[in-house]
Image (tube, helix red, strand yellow):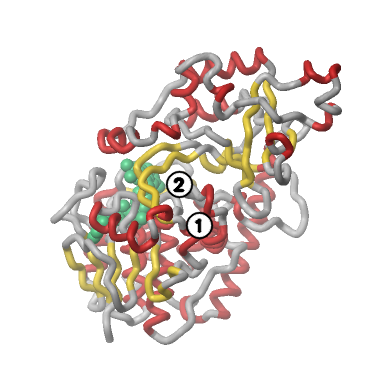
Amino acid sequence: QEPIHVIGGGLAGTEAAWQIATLGVPVILHEMRPTRFSPAHHSQELAELVCSNSFGAQASDRAAGLLHEELRRLGSVVISKADEHAVPAGGALAVDRGRFSHDLTETLANHPLIELRRGEVPEIPQSGVVVLATGPLTSPALAEELRRFTGMEYLSFFDAASPIVVGESINRDIAFLASRYDKGDAAYLNCPMNREQYLQFWQELCIAEQTELKDFERETAKFFEACLPIEELARRGEDTMRYGPLKPVGLFDARLGDFRAPENQSKRPYAVVQLRQEDKAGKLWNMVGFQTNLRWGEQKRIFQLIPGLENAEFVRLGVMHRNTFINAPELLLPTLQFKHRATLLAAGQLIGTEGYTAAAAGGWLAGTNAARLVLGKEALSLPPTTMMGALFEFISSASPKHFQPMPPNFGILPDLAERIKNKQQRYGMYRDRALNDLNCWQVENILHNTIQVAV
Ligand code: FAD
């Protein structure tokens, strides 16, 4: 049997290779370290955690915790080893990073169907079944090849992502639906500010604490003058934001009456923060032009000063960092196969999911499907009510025009049959539905329901 090639031995590639071997198919796992290092990797172990040692909240009624639990039930080797090497971290699943990566390296190296091959893969293999999992810091040669394969417009090298807010947490008594000059559908939620509110917001932004960009990120950031962080715009002058993303022109709350009427002229907002719909269901809203390097605590504190966002719940805060990712909605199916080459699959940060656990989840699905293709079975997609299914549904169906990476969160799950106001109760119900549906799916698709990690 021809082996499957998995390129990249990070979180996603390690999981993918393990799932392939577990299904009885030989696999070559290519990892460029130690012959070549990305600017953030320092060891030669598989699944190196490049920054924090945390996989996020443990509790299964939290988005990260639900993803852990789904992966546990599916026999994920990454989560199994994370559990084994967990260290105390309050409510989070954090690991002893050295032991975690070392154990995964040994475990994979000792599997008779896995060949661990060290060295950079500069090109996408032309034939056979291949899984791409080279992560946010994909080597320049392969990134160039990907750019050619996908068409340049489908590959990003820098993530300048604005915060995303849960629609239900936006105060609709204040925020109003409208498009600038009423063009097209009323596709934006607009948070109006009066002068006093704007000035307070501006002053807070000017003095807010920022995160430090790493040297290699500073180099890339230089090329992104067109998408300056919001705090940088603020520092350029009191009115810079009002002539940029917070421009108030052409936006008026129709609930206040006809904006042309002279008595309504004074009701025009001084500045407006716009939020654009992020998902098909309109449950998530992206703050337009709010890419930022502010510390996460500062983002919450300052963005909640915006009228209408006083109780905003953020599913993702703004980030600006180097991140190679493809335009998954344009290129991928929810099975993680490329639309134009079904034997080529991709997983991890490269497909626009965010975080260690999401990378392992992508690796699980891409690996499982790669093996299934070799075994002559059809590729699977997961129920959209599970966190894994919802994530892959999202990245393969979001708007390609504004596609930005997405972490696991409850906002991407389909609505529950009934409306539950209490957030904790609602999340618990999402969890129950997800695990129940995953169970049924496993029974129907038998393959994995009996597989346990044999380590
Ligand atoms: P990676 O884990 O990066 O794995 C990709 C692997 O592919 C690497 O081992 C690399 O050496 C290899 N590779 C690349 N190109 C080639 C090639 N051509 N041939 C062969 N091998 C190749 N996420 C979090 O959840 N928490 C954090 O704290 C966090 N901090 C981050 C900090 C930085 C600086 C960066 C860049 C990212 C951070 N992330 C964090 C995101 C993180 O990268 C992902 O969550 C996770 O590592 C993605 O897994 P992956 O398998 O897609 O990529």
Residue type (three-letter) at the residue carrying disc 1: Leu
Neighbor class of circle 1 (other Cα within 10 Å; few <14, some 14-19, many 20+) is: many
Asked whether 77 or 25 is in front, the reply is 25
* Horizontal side, residue 427 vs residue 135: left or right: right
Asked whether 239 or 159 is in front, the reply is 239
* Horizontal side, residue 390 vs residue 68: left or right: right
Residue type (three-letter) at the residue carrying disc 2: Gly
**Dot 2: element:** strand
Q: Quadrant of residue 22?
A: bottom left
Q: CA distance from mark 1 to mark 2?
A: 10 Å
Quarter of the figure with the C terminus: bottom left
**Dot 1: element:** helix
Total residue callouts: 2
Q: Residue at x 52, y 20 (%)?
A: 240
Asked whether 314 or 73 is in front, the reply is 314
> In x, y percent, where is residue 145?
29, 60
Of label 1 and label 2, which has the lower sequence position? Answer: 2
> In x, y percent, where is residue 169?
68, 38
**Where is mark 2, residue-wise?**
56
Q: Residue at x 61, y 26 (%)?
A: 247
> Are discs 1 and 2 less than 8 Å apart at CB?
yes
* Horizontal side, residue 337 vs residue 216: left or right: right
**Where is mark 1, residue-wise?**
67
Asked whether 32 or 244 is in front, the reply is 244
Can residue 353 be seen from the camera position used here? Answer: yes
Q: Is mark 2 within 8 Å of ligand 1?
A: yes
Disc number for residue 187:
none
Can residue 79 be seen from the camera position used here? Answer: no
Q: Is mark 1 within 8 Å of ligand 1?
A: no
Q: Residue at x 23, y 48 (%)?
A: 38
> In x, y percent, where is residue 423?
67, 44
